[in-house]
Amino acid sequence: MLVRNSLLYFLIRVGSGIINFLAMLVYTRLISPADYGQYALVVSGVGLFNTACFQWLRLSLFRFFPRYLGDSQKLFSTIFSGFLGVCFLTGIVGIVLAFSDFVPLWRNLIFMGVVLLWLEAWLELNLELQCVKLQPFRYGLMLGIKSVIALALGAALAIYGLGPYGPLFGLIGGCILATLFVGRGEWHKITLAIDKDLLKELLKYGLPLTATFALSFIVSYSDRFIIAWLLGESAAGQYAAVYDLAQQPLILLMATINLASYPLAIRALEKGGKEETDKILVRNAVLLMGIGLPASLGMIVLAPNISETLLGVKFRTGAAPVLAWVAGSICLNGLRAYHFDLAFQLSRHTVGQIWVAGSAALLNLILNFWWIPIWGIVGAAYATFAAYFLALVLSVILGRRIFCVPVPWWDWLKIAASCVPMVLAILMIKESHGIVSLSLQVICGMGIYAFTAMLLNIGNVRSKLLQKLRVGEK
């Protein structure tokens, strides 16, 4: 089931990821770096408030849904009532911010950000529900509608000349249509009622994780605000475009595996099967490293060609080193968030994650204010890598004290060995530039890595393939 669901979520996420990736490429050609910076800052602010205010509801739904299968209405009613309460509070905060000392442009963008925050939070709550119910097709339909509408509408309005408003209106339209046609049927029977005991349990579990994710979000996105403050909105727009160029494909690959494995691990653990849970976590770790490491190394080696080929002309200057460092950072962050941090979540000792994320956020802020004035946007990439490395180390050390997450060291060593010939082959042909050359470089690297991985039998992939072939012959 893990492999099947991983494949389904992979196809879903690839489709949505390609559309979102195209959106980034389109917008860097249709709007200026300053407009892209304003758009990126609004989206980053929405993401921060979404994480800080609504994440506990999504995490609680994901974690407690299997327990309340026989009484889901009580869980749904409590979560929905909590959602409306948070919407009311964030609306007040948005009004206060909008009528602070902001220029009219940012006042309008703040109002749009509040609306987008509510819609994004509602969409993600429904996506989480489809995931925990093991319904990848409904999950994919919602995500697909949102991505397609957001790109089509956002690009049309950007061409019309709306600047940062175009992509934001696209996101708003995509969220509305996705939840209107797919997500509305899950909640129509519930009542506005809060079970106080259940709410306390949800808060106890979810709030520490919310704090953790909010602090992790600071590591990922605070650099954009600091760059805008120190270097201007154009520099923030350029950095955000390069960061998104690295983050979207890598997180897409690694998050897909987590979407498939985490629900299965929770269900196995709820049934009291630590041994079965460990088997799922081992497969999770092999898939994460087996996909994340070669993808990030390929992006690091091909960073000059990737940035020159895919980014708009105004966004290319100094992009390659930023892309390389961010790619390495995302790989470290994926291993931490989607494997080692599961120790805190599966054991429900989520307070421990606050120390991990808080330490990384503090280091990131200090290094950003120190290194950005020295090295510009590359300094922000250095700071991100250092913060994610610290977070990974702390997650490994602290997590193993409360829940021993298995680590398949032998398979990880074989994955690293498989990456060596891949990197050497790409280095030999990396000087060629252009979309055709980039495609050939990627295909060549993937082919060599896949052949070596099969040869070394990573995760028993060769043995399983041969076994299926024998069964097929019979």
Image: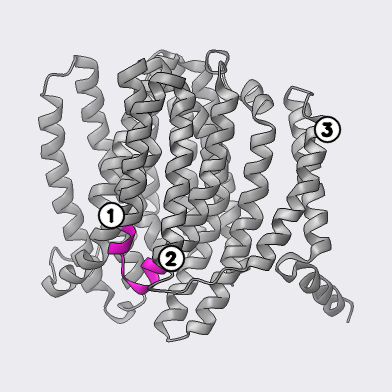
Q: Contact (CB < 8 A) between labels 2 and 3?
A: no
* Dot 1 or dot 2, earlier in sequence: 1
Identified at 76% across, 46% down, the residue is 446
Horizontal side of 314 relative to 430 (left or right) equals left
Name the residue at 36% across, 73% down: 347
Relative image position of residue 149 (x, y in whole percent): 45, 36
User: Amino acid under label 1?
Assistant: Thr
The spot of residue 126 in percent (x, y) is 35, 56
| One can see residue 36 in this view | no
Residue, disc 3:
428
- Mark 1 sits on what residue? 210
Q: Dot 2 corresponds to which residue?
A: 342
Q: Amino acid at mark 2?
A: Leu
Distance (Cα) linking label 2 and label 3 = 39 Å
Q: Nearer the viewer, residue 39 or 228?
A: 228
Q: CA distance from mark 1 to mark 3?
A: 45 Å
Tell me which label, 1 or 3, sits earlier in the chain.
Answer: 1
The dominant secondary structure in magenta is helix
344 in the magenta segment: yes
Judge whether residue 49 can be spotted in this image. Answer: yes
Q: From mark 1 to mark 2, how far is it between C-alphas?
A: 14 Å
**In the figure, residue 319 lies in which quadrant?**
top right
Left or right of 228? Residue 419 is: right
Residue 206: quadrant of the picture: bottom left
Disc 3 crowd rating (10 Å Cα; few below 14, some 14-19, many 20+) is: few
> Going 57% across and 44% down the picture, which residue do you hit?
250
State which region is magenta.
342-353
